[in-house]
Image (cartoon, rainbow, N blue to C red):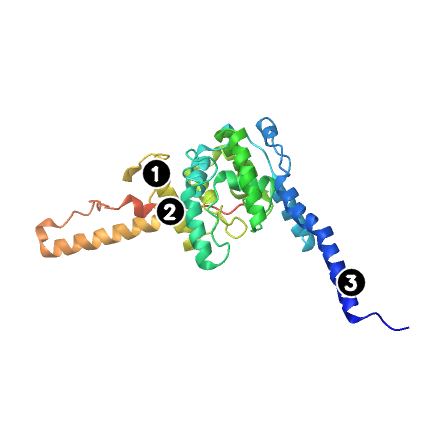
Amino acid sequence: MNPPPAKAVNMSWRRKLAYAVLAIGPLIVAAPLTYLLWLPNVPALRTSNPVHTSLMELREQQALRNGQPLKTVYRWKDLKEISPHLAHAVLLSEDDVFYEHKGFDMEQIRLAVKIDWEKKRFAYGGSTLTQQLARSLYLSPRKNIFRKAKEALITLLLERDLSKTRILELYLNVVEWGRGIYGAEAAAQTYFQKPAKDLTPDEAVALASILPSPRRWSPLSERSFMARRRTRLYARMRRAGFLPVETLADLKIPDEVQELANMANSFLQQQAANDNPSSRPSADSEPEVMLNEEDLYVPTHEAPQP
């Protein structure tokens, strides 16, 4: 029996391909639409606190795949039970126009577009607290256009259905603060062995300074990079009026700084005495310390005890 003409075979395959496209095409379109249009019940968050979040689940799955089961530490606390120092530090570090925007910081978005375009990748987020909350509660840290679009939709719902105070309270309770550590209370207990309401300004700044990358950085790190981040954030808190302006007498001068200042003053006084013997200080006179208070702020944090 002779085989069918080649042209007929080709037409047959083209027809089959066309049928396949017609059958699968709607599914290809419907899948992302379904993903985008399935939205969480945000109004429920007005009165109920999340028990688990999408980010927690993702981290646990990642740990299991790597053969390293992860213990999740998560303890809810109302906003009144969290140190205002921590709330202020987080706002200044992550979203200093939180109370002014409706979920999106347009200046940060423009900056993110510029940087991402130059680097040809998603290199800079520019996300507000509300966007970060949407991502932590319902999505993942993965960077793609569909996830960003859904994040934007959920952000609009959060801003529409919740107060700013509630959004901040939710954020401070579910934000990731280290491997398996979520929320202010878990972070305070893990790193400083105290409740979140008792965090000092130094400790609050240390916690807020790692939020851009909490699984990579530690609030207890003494590396120069982290020390600079803490110092800058502490100064911003003071300029914003969240901390009182301290006088030199109020500051605790580290022993090594005090010793160096004393040595310097003693040297200068000795030089002056050599030039003018009549001005030589008596044996019981005390050196006068002249220090700049900004130079004295060196955050110190003790490592957690095992």
Q: Which element carries disc 2, helix, strand or loop?
A: helix
- Kind of residue sitting beneath label 2: Thr
Mark nearest the camera among 2 and 3 is 3
Q: Residue beneath label 3, please?
A: 12
User: Residue 276 location, x and y as percent?
Assistant: 9, 53
Q: Residue beneath label 2, please?
A: 231
Q: Tag 3 or tag 2, which sits nearer the N-term?
A: 3
* Quarter of the rendering occupied by the N terminus: bottom right
- Kind of residue sitting beneath label 1: Arg
Q: Are marks 2 and 3 in contact (CB under 8 Å)?
A: no
Residue occupying image coordinates x 9% and y 53%: 277
User: Which residue reaches farthest right?
Assistant: 1
Residue occupying image coordinates x 75% and y 55%: 19
Q: Tag 1 or tag 3, which sits nearer the N-term?
A: 3
Badge number at residue 68: none
Judged left or right of residue 187, residue 109 is: left
- Kind of residue sitting beneath label 3: Ser
Q: Residue beneath label 1, please?
A: 238
Q: CA distance from mark 1 to mark 2?
A: 11 Å
Q: Is residue 235 above or below residue 124?
A: above
Front in this rendered view, residue 107 or 301 = 107
Q: Which element carries disc 3, helix, strand or loop?
A: helix
Q: Are marks 3 and 1 in contact (CB under 8 Å)?
A: no
Q: Is residue 130 above or below residue 20?
A: above
Mark nearest the camera among 3 and 1 is 3
Residue 183 visible in rendering: no
User: Residue 58 location, x and y as percent?
Assistant: 64, 47
* Disc 1 packing (10 Å; few <14; some 14–19; many ≥20): few
Q: Tag 2 or tag 1, which sits nearer the N-term?
A: 2
* Disc 3 packing (10 Å; few <14; some 14–19; many ≥20): few
